[in-house]
Amino acid sequence: MEAPATPDQKQRLAKLSAHEVQTKELGGEKIESILSRAPGNDAPIGGIKVITQSGWFAARPSGTEDIYKIYAESFRDAGHLQRILEEAETMVADALAGVPVV
């Protein structure tokens, strides 16, 4: 999924940290982890990845266009994937608007 983003919004998303996301659920499940750094080498991932038992999403700004991208996967079905995408889009839009992500 892609959405427009200004350069300032892209910068905010790239620097978004896991502790700024206060949401407890995604796709009807408890969030198990929120990553803003790579587990292997602790390097910044330039966005966030939110993981549950049955799915995940990652949001990152494009390096070449005025957009951000959301990547997602459900281990259940297409309906669950759609719910993850919708909730991810809301979380990212709130973060870009400077609204606390709760």
Image (spheres, rainbow, N blue to C red):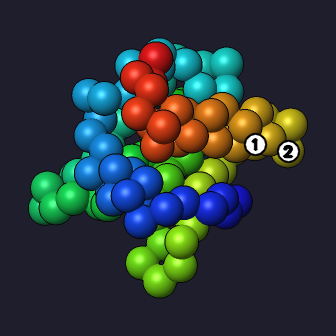
The front one of 11 and 86 is 11
Q: Residues within 10 Å of mark 2 (few under 14, many from 20)?
A: few
Query: What's the amino acid at mark 1?
Result: Leu
Query: What's the amino acid at mark 2?
Result: Ala
Q: Is residue 77 visible?
A: no
Mark 1 touches mark 2? (CB < 8 Å): yes
Which residue is found at the position 31% from the left and 29% from the top? 20
Provide the secondary structure element on which disc 1 rests. Answer: helix
Q: Position of residue 41 (x, y in %)?
A: 13, 62
For disc 2, the marked residue is 78
Which residue is found at the position 45% from the left and 26% from the top? 99
The front one of 21 and 8 is 8
Which residue is found at the position 53% from the left and 41% from the top? 92
Q: Is residue 69 left or right of residue 40?
A: right
Identity of the residue furthest to the bottom in this view:
64
Provide the secondary structure element on which disc 2 rests. Answer: helix
